[in-house]
Image (cartoon, coloured by chain):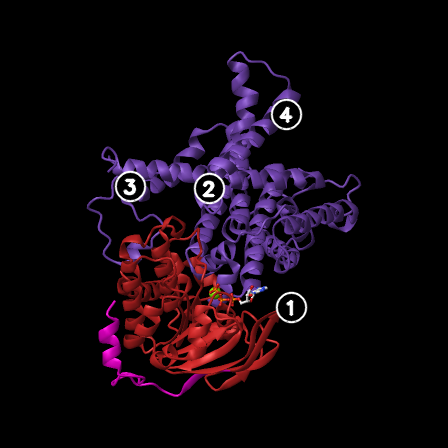
Chain colours: A purple, B red
Amino acid sequence: MLYREAGQFKTSYEADQSIFPIMQDRWGIAAILAFAFLAMPFLASEYFFRAVMIPFLILALAAIGLNLLVGYCGQISLGTGAFMAVGAYAAYNFAIRVPELPHLVTLLLAGGVAAVVGLLFGIPSLRIKGLYLAAATLAAQFFIDWLFSRVKWFTNYTPSGSVAAPQLNIFGWVPDAPSEKYLLCLGFVTVFALVAKNLVRSRIGRSWMAIRDMDIAAEIIGIRPMHAKLSAFAISSFIVGVAGALWGFVHLGSWEPLAFSIDRSFSLLFMVILGGLGSILGCFLGAAFITLVPIFLNQVLPELGIKLDTATVSHLEFMIFGALIVVFLIAEPHGMARLWQVGKEKLRIWPFPH
Amino acid sequence: MQSATARAERGEGQPAAGRKFGGEILKVDGISLSFGGVKALSDVSFSIREHEIFAIIGPNGAGKSSMLNVINGFYHPQQGTVTYKGVTRRDVDPHDAARNGIARTFQNIALFKGMSTLDNVMTGRILKMRRGILWQALYWGPAQREEIEHRAFVERIIDFLEIQAIRKTPVGRLPYGLQKRVELARALAMEPDLLLLDEPMAGMNVEEKEDMCRFILDVNEQFGTTIALIEHDMGVVMDISDRVVVLDYGRKIADGTPDVVRGDKAVIDAYLGVAH
Ligand SMILES: Nc1ncnc2c1ncn2[C@@H]1O[C@H](COP(=O)(O)OP(=O)(O)OP(=O)(O)O)[C@@H](O)[C@H]1O
Ligand SMILES: [Mg+2]
């Protein structure tokens, strides 16, 4: 079927404001969701779930959180890894200290704790911008790293400092098989992607973008910068915190403080920049890219007869990301999501571009 | 432009018959503002009546933009007070000003470049929207109804300013003249009682200027909005304003109807650059 909107007249503002105003897009997303929820669990291998789909989904969730802050509100953060750690350790402590809490509540409470911590570390944004704010969030990263490796209470005094998360139990459902873990993550990502999309097309999203684009003008139309910035920090950290809890409980199972180091912060920032600042779709594209490149280098290249040792592969990974980031920042600051959009616009008027 | 007819309708030195003004909506009294050594305003006082179109003119650097910035709380004067709707203040808070119905546009367009025309204008409704974050996250029921209600309001402004065709265009891609129009649309979306326009026609061609004049007059007439505008084009000023204040080097040198001001010796000197 052609990708066209001809004949699809919008007769109400309601229809015009829907997330996917073009019919082909609605069918496309419905097909993807149906496939992901109904077919995928029966098709993919355990390895594929564990190495590709689960990390991809959780990282996409964290990227959505980060993108609300960086892409929509224009506040830089290098502390995403730390906010994921706050979510993971909060969930761990709730789970072992208040075991009677339903685990779904535990995961959401972990997001709540991350939101409060994110809000506190967002306070400097009221005074400083850009590079200085980046430095302040970097300090948050180091402080939180230090906290979880030095204050033994958080790791329940385990001698090695590494913690093992209890098996999740979501109201009687125990997602222990890889395909079930995948479904759990998919559920979270679907809900939060929808929530994020709803927020950015509402009043609060518009006030974030106004602050991002021109804070002076935002103020004179009655937006309070403090309100907008701190709400972005809190909501962003909430989602990042839930992603961190899932990363610990579902993907890793047991982890050390290093699991949420500054490397994690950078790789999430890369995802958001490559995927597209200020785009929910971009979070998925960026996360897919970052998950797939190492797998490509490790698995596909050897099969093509190109042998590389592991050190080279990990260097190559960084070089590829680095080069792409430079290219995107110069050529297409809105990332892969914009390329996709431009492609669609071309297709809409194809084959008569004028 | 139709200056001759407009002036004729208005009569010599008198507001045109049929134009009704209310009481004083804004009064600035003894405002002095300086930046380090630079005196931007010294002891400036004037008042604006409800429903009138009021022009602030003067040579470059006279302090016109600074005056608007004082009125909406962007600059805080060292001396003097601003009385708006009967409340007298030294320091106006920009947020309070917005809440109490003061909207403005800027000399150097201050739009949200990454957002579409529609979203830019929708930001003007932010103070009127009530639903909390949880409702917005659900985007359902009352939250969706609220969005649609405000969208309908914004669409009326879009129709009024004839910018339907660029609704979904990111404003960064629009030509200068249209950006000025979108900025006016955003200010109008706030349903202001007092609209401050900083050089709304600067850099426009004759046709665009005529459109903008028409919009300003229509806003004033249809919604009763009080308008204070800064403009360098004397033809336009004499044409559309009810009263004019003239600033020069931060001081008020004249105040009155366009015809009185035009004949004023100090004004002629200021504009011809006679040495002080
Ligand atoms: N934020 C500021 N910091 C320092 N000086 C300022 C600031 N704003 C204005 N000024 C100075 O105050 C004086 C008046 O400036 P203002 O912008 O109000 O003039 P204007 O009448 O609007 O001029 P123009 O017609 O060029 O727009 C100028 O000398 C200007 O340099
Ligand atoms: Mg000026």
**Whole-Å distance between the Cαs marked 3 and 1?**
63 Å
| Foreground of the two, A329 or A248 | A329
| Foreground of the two, A10 or B232 | B232
Query: Which residue is label 2 attached to?
Result: A334
Horizontal placement of B97 versus A99: left or right?
A: left
Helix, strand or loop for disc 1 = loop
Q: Earlier in the sequence, mark 3 or mark 4?
A: 3
Classify mark 2: residues with Cα within 10 Å, few (<14), some (14-19) or many (20+): many
Q: Which residue is drawn at the image coordinates 34% and 42% (left, top)?
A: A30
Q: Position of residue A205 (x, y in %)?
A: 46, 57
**Whole-Å distance between the Cαs marked 1 and 4?**
57 Å
**Amino acid under label 3?**
Gln
**Residue A138 in the image: above or below residue A40:** below
Helix, strand or loop for disc 4 = helix
Query: Which residue is label 4 attached to?
Result: A315
Segment colored magenta:
B1-28
Horizontal placement of B202 versus A62: left or right?
A: left
Q: Chain of mark 2?
A: A
**Amino acid under label 1?**
Gly
